[in-house]
Image (spheres, rainbow, N blue to C red):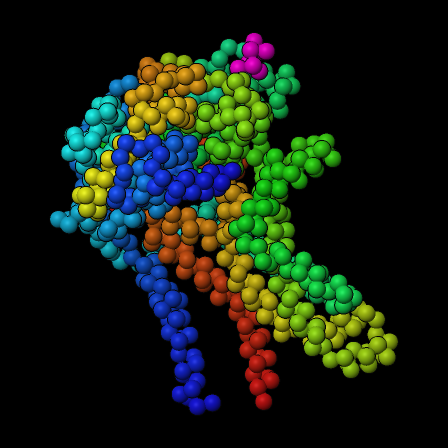
Amino acid sequence: MKFKTFAAFVGPSVFMMLLFIAAPLVSVFIQSFQVTQPILEQIEVETCTPGFLTQTCTTEIKTVPALDENGKTITETRWVGLQSYQNVLQMDKFWSAIGNGSWNQIMQIDFWKALRFTLTFTLLTLPLVIGVGLAIALAVNNATRSIRGPVIFVSLLPFIITPVIGSLSIYWLFVGDGILTVMLERWSGQNISMFAQSWTIEILMYFYQVWHVAPFAFVIFYAGLQTVNMDTLESAVIDGASRWERLRHVIVPHLMPLIIFISLIHLMDTYRAFEVIVGFRSQAHVISLQWLTYDFMTPDDAGNRAMSRASASAMLTMIGIVFLLILPLRRTWRDHKGSAH
Amino acid sequence: MFLKRIALAGAVSLMGSAALACSYQNEVPIKSLSAGFEAWKAVTDAMAECGNFQAELDQEFRKKQPAAFEANPSLYHIGGVANGTITPLLNAGTIRPLDDLVEKYGQTLKPNQLIRINGQIMAVAMMVNTQHLMYRSDVLADLGIATPTTWDEVYAAAAKIKEAGVMEYPLGATMKSGWNIAQEFVNMYPAHGGAFFNADNTTAVNSDAGMAALETMKAALEFTDPEVLVSDSTYVQQQFQQGKIAMANLWASRAGAMDDEAESQVVGKVAMAAAPKAVADGAPATTLWWDGIVIAKNISDEEAEAAFRLAMEGLDAETVQGANDAAIWLVDGYQPTEIAQGAIATATANPAPPAYPSTTQMGLLHSALGNELPSFLTGERDAAATLAAIEEAYTTSAKEAGVLK
């Protein structure tokens, strides 16, 4: 292909990526080393607020931001180095907890608590998603042609549902007065509170994630199964290979690139777990890294946002993803180089 | 249910041009952003009757209001605020003084409704809100329990109800991790005699009063549903409506829903009393709130005038009479009924509970409380460590916000 044609095809996409991915990333990277604060002044303010019948007026010294002549808040931006990262990571507390050998103390630090959950969530669901996806694909592939269409449609449903809605559905089914909880309570005769302790919440989260992502793996595997070399399979049958051996030695090696692909996508997506936290309202027990960033960014009633810590936390999340992806990416790279010619 | 209500409110406000019961025809397109509870629905519906009005009712309004009002021109003309959420608007100077407009259109307003900051009217309040004790009068009467006035009495009553086997979890609490649980502490801590801040803007919660407040909060867990850390106001309201709990310190704006026959199985059985005290001779353990309207600064004077005139139409006696039990209205024409007794008793108590402090520092402390309190209630951390963690979290964010050096 001529370079000009190539550039014409790729150009718009590269431009979009620079504008919407690279530029914000650079800006977040810079912001994570800065702190932007309003210039504050202390003034005496008299505030009159209503009681039921009469007003109460109080005069107090309030710290308020100063405004310039256009009525805009005056802010100043300072470079603070790694201060925001330190505020997120809280390394001093982390090392002292390590020194005490106290896992519980480490889990009291938001970042490490979030990291612990995010990693287990990502790594535990990965084999489950691949296993369940492959199982559905094999089942559909072996099903009679007439029912294949409906089966594919039904298996894809969880993937089509918007993640937040999916997690909310699970929450509503299992919360204190949810349909499933009430049914289980009636059946078992004891009170069930799925959202009262972290381990039950986490189990529901794993279940939700596998339920939601497995159809994606299924579609990819199902497509891959259509290209399995029938000659190899037939000769394996003739050689007396059992169903399991055929799967182990013919089908899985054939699907390996797809397994890597799904692992990559799954690691990237799941490390950014967010909707399960919001949907399950699990903040009291379980938080994720992405939720932590969101929480820093959310303004409180007085309009304060911790943008610097949010930026630092976002950068740390990205670094985490890069680390996770190194292994599968190296393998793809090797395969790619091996099969180039 | 809630989404349906919002959708309905939106639909109603779009149909508003029919001009049903408005005294004039509004010609200037006006938009408003406010919270989504019953009282706001009543007020915005009344405004919609004048035409050309679009209301956005959103319980998460606080997240978008500051930015929306800072735009030029402002994305909304009318804002619904409470004493907590007016702070960012005041700080950024994005709302306008209303003195001249009040003089022109606000003849029916009572002096009590005018929120004055340094003498200037910056907002017009329409209702007061507070968390107070709601209880099942039938359950308490059956067991011969007098209306509890302190938290100790509440727990004693809860123990009796549990013992009698009437309910497994007699107590409801708005302890959802985040804003709600922090508010519980904000109610409890001043009632134990605590001050939130020192003169130099550092926080003073790491104190004996803080310990006492935490103890009182934790004592509730024995009588609440195990999932209490996910329960917000709507959840507690539903627990009441389904007859699952007998007592809760819940918002006055939720009282009307107890007698809503479409939703509630306990119509006429829920009574209201003053918020329980933390110490016998103290103030009720709660904070006083007001809700009201502000007008954006970054709009033309004509629009501001039209917006204020429209707001006055929404805040008139007719609206209030149509939705008398939706709130503790400050507007003329309000007839306090049975269900308002608790809120009025709370607000007029002596000593009276404090108003929720609307300051930048309080916003920061509220977030710190919301994030750090849950691990105390789940038992992962003891009270002293929790208070230290709150202090540390506040210090970090206060430094980042520039409040502390």
Q: Quadrant of residue A229?
A: bottom right
- Left or right: residue A56 compared with residue A256: left
The magenta stretch spans residue B138: yes
Answer above or below: position of B149 versus A252. Answer: above
- Left or right: residue A202 compared with residue A229: left
The residue at the point 23 percent across, 29 percent down is: B115
The residue at the point 70 percent across, 72 percent down is: A225
Residue bounds of the magenta highlight:
B137-144
Residue B129 at x, y percent in the picture: 37, 26
Along the line of sight, which residue is nearer the eye, B306 or A296? Answer: B306
The single residue placed furthest to the top in the displayed view is: B144
Answer above or below: position of A26 versus B394. Answer: below
Number of marks drawn = 0
Residue B33 at x, y percent in the picture: 34, 42
- Left or right: residue B335 compared with residue A267: left
The residue at the point 46 percent across, 46 percent down is: A109
Looking at the image, can residue A37 be seen?
no
The magenta stretch spans residue B135: no
Report the quarter where the C terminus of chain A lies: bottom right
The residue at the point 43 percent across, 79 percent down is: A10
Residue B284 at x, y percent in the picture: 38, 19
